[in-house]
Amino acid sequence: MTSRKYVIFVVSLLYAFMLLNLVLWHSIVKVSFTQKDLNRIGSFISTEALTKNVKYTKHHTSLREYITSGKNESFDVITMGDSFTNGGGYAYYQDYLTSHYGLKILNASISGNCIEDLYIFIKAGVIDNVRPKAVVLESVERGVQGIMGIREIDSGFMTNEKAKRLVQNIGMKQNTKQLSSGLLPPLAFNANMNFIYNKLYHIMNPERLSSFVYITELNRNFFTNPGYEHTLLHYCDDLLYLNSPVNAEMVNRNLNNAASILKEKNIQLIFFVGVDKYDLYYPYIINHNGRPENQYFHDMRRISPKDYVFIDTMKIFREALEHDEKDIYWFGDTHWSWKGMQLFCDELVKYFNWLN
């Protein structure tokens, strides 16, 4: 083969390779990639829910907005947590509280570890500047053990100066770019390979769409996605409790310690957990494959004393399911929908002692 033919051959292969990636990305993969998180990581294309998302008329203040404004404003409530607190589910529960109840809310999540974030805020002096009436902490159920169930967290783990620098740096963070835009975005090749791999993985493991996503059937219709009304997608880490159950005693100790510090400042502490989908829908799953039920919420209900308010999201949502409420969580997502958010918020405000 001459050098000219060799170059033409290599260029043709590269061209064909890029063309195949382009076609696969735009015809199939991009659809699942731009749907909800379980669709994306499970390479699963589904219909959209008949329940449409909502837009709230009033909005909370983000920590970045607070820092860049340079104002020492006061707020009724500070919220801290992971993705459930930071817009997971395609809306902020804080915006519902602001729009519906007129509350002034600062969402001040830093690391996603709500207890450590609270202590950073205290050390940085922001709590004293903001003077909230309540702090609402949140963790997704599968993350509770790692965040506050392993050890007793020392409130002095960070110096005042380091805490101040960390909070100030929040205001300097830039918004992330849309990674899936363009004719052939940089991530398209990896996404295409993952899509093919996940389809083969599912053939070998019918219970799983990928190594990260499980698929199972329910005995009742709880979603409005046409064709998937009684199908449940859930994240693999929803099953972490099987080998690493939550130490509810340690969780309670850490929350009581935090509540004690806030009580000295006349601030109420409220804690809630974003219940895992597998745990929430467990009674309605047809085949558990021998898996017992997660005992976390049962353990948290019985434990005492609690010097904080514990909002039992499991109880709220299970009661709604018994009344045939649909789309409390989005079908293709690990997060609650606005329906779940509003059910939670309507319960939460009952415990704001300055409102009642």
Image (cartoon, helix red, strand yellow):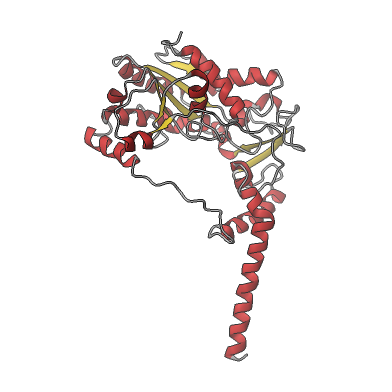
The quadrant of the image that shows the N terminus is bottom right
Residue, x 69% and y 26% (percent of image)?
326
**Image height check: is 42 above or below 156?**
below
Query: What count of labels does the image hold?
Result: 0
- Quarter of the figure with residue 46: top right
**Image height check: is 57 above or below 7?**
above
In this orientation, which residue lies closer to the viewer: 230 or 141? Answer: 230
Residue 78, position in %: x, y?
39, 25
Residue 157, position in %: x, y?
28, 32
Residue 16, position in %: x, y?
65, 72
Left/right placement of residue 98 relative to residue 35 reads left
- Quarter of the figure with residue 76: top left
In this orientation, which residue lies closer to the viewer: 19 or 194? Answer: 19
Regarding residue 154, the answer to whether it shows in the image is no
In this orientation, which residue lies closer to the viewer: 34 or 115? Answer: 34
Left/right placement of residue 261 relative to residue 343 reads left
Q: Residue furthest top?
A: 356
Residue, x 74% and y 33% (percent of image)?
229
Q: Residue furthest bottom?
A: 2
- Quarter of the figure with residue 337: top right
Q: Residue furthest right?
A: 227
Residue 124, position in %: x, y?
27, 31
Regarding residue 80, the answer to whether it shows in the image is yes
Residue, x 65% and y 19% (percent of image)?
320
